[in-house]
Image (cartoon, rainbow, N blue to C red):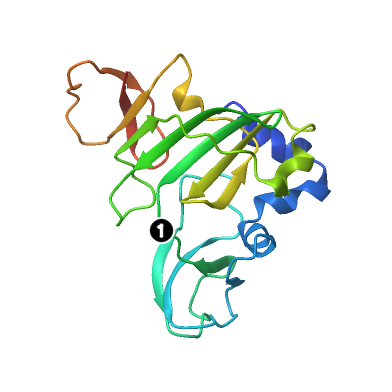
């Protein structure tokens, strides 16, 4: 099967090597002052931590887990990191040359990081985080993911799910019967997690 390059692919193939740190979630978390560290570094106190790959060009929450850690982290996968656990709304915000043009909220069961129940467009206004100001005039698009007011990851692309004035996006998963709710329409929109399409309006 052939795939066309995505905006993320283009970034990784053309970006200045000095800019790649922003796609490493461990480095980003450290620069933002979060309590975090790579596999093998002890956590500061027992508690719940998010554990995920330092770098994941595919995105989509792949490999992410919520794990109770007492102290040691040698059992975690190599190439992963742990970070303090944040609570709050999950917002995905798109910027064009540093100016926001879209914000959507993701709704899901707390037990999954890959299968979202619904995404809805919101009116939230969130300025581009200052740590990214130097990128705003060099990359057309920046996508930021937030938990509450905490920036958790950055992509150099925009959210294609909400093109054509879509305001709500409900994923449809493999094995589910296709039956759009009133006022929604179904579109084919597969991904690597088993999503086959979505109900949109």
48 with respect to 128 (left or right): left
- Give the camera-side residue of 45 and 77: 45
Label 1 SS: loop
134 up-or-down from 170: above or below: below
Quarter of the figure with the C terminus = top left
* 87 to 198, vertically: above or below: below
80 or 145, nearer to the observer: 145
Which of the 4 image quadrants contains residue 37? bottom right
The residue shown at (69%, 61%) is 31
Q: Position of residue 10 (x, y in %)?
A: 69, 32
Question: Can residue 40 be seen in this snapshot?
Answer: yes
Along the viewing direction, whichever of 14 and 137 lies nearer the viewer: 137
Task: State left or right for residue 195 relative to residue 40.
Answer: left
Measured as percent of width and height from the top left, residue 100 is found at 60, 29
Pointer 1 residue: 87
For residue 1, say whether it is visible.
no
Q: Is residue 102 above or below residue 155?
A: above
């Amino acid at each position: 099967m052939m795939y066309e390059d995505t905006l993320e692919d283009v970034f990784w193939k053309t970006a200045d090597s000095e800019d790649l740190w922003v796609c490493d979630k461990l480095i980003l978390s450290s620069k933002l002052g979060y309590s975090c560290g790579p596999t093998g570094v002890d956590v500061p106190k027992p508690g719940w931590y998010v554990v995920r790959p330092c770098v994941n060009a595919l995105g989509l929450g792949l490999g992410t887990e919520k794990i109770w850690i007492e102290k040691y982290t040698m059992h975690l996968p190599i190439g992963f990191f742990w970070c303090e656990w944040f609570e709050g709304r999950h917002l995905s915000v798109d910027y064009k040359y540093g100016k926001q043009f879209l914000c959507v909220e993701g709704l899901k069961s707390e037990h999954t990081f890959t299968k979202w129940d619904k995404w809805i467009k919101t009116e939230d206004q969130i300025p581009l985080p200052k740590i990214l100001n130097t990128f705003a005039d060099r990359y057309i698009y920046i996508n930021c993911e937030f938990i509450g007011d905490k920036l958790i990851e950055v992509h150099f692309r925009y959210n294609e799910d909400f093109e054509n004035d879509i305001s709500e996006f409900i994923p449809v998963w493999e094995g589910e019967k296709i039956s759009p709710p009133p006022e929604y329409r179904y579109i084919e929109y597969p991904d690597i997690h088993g999503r086959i399409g979505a109900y949109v309006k």
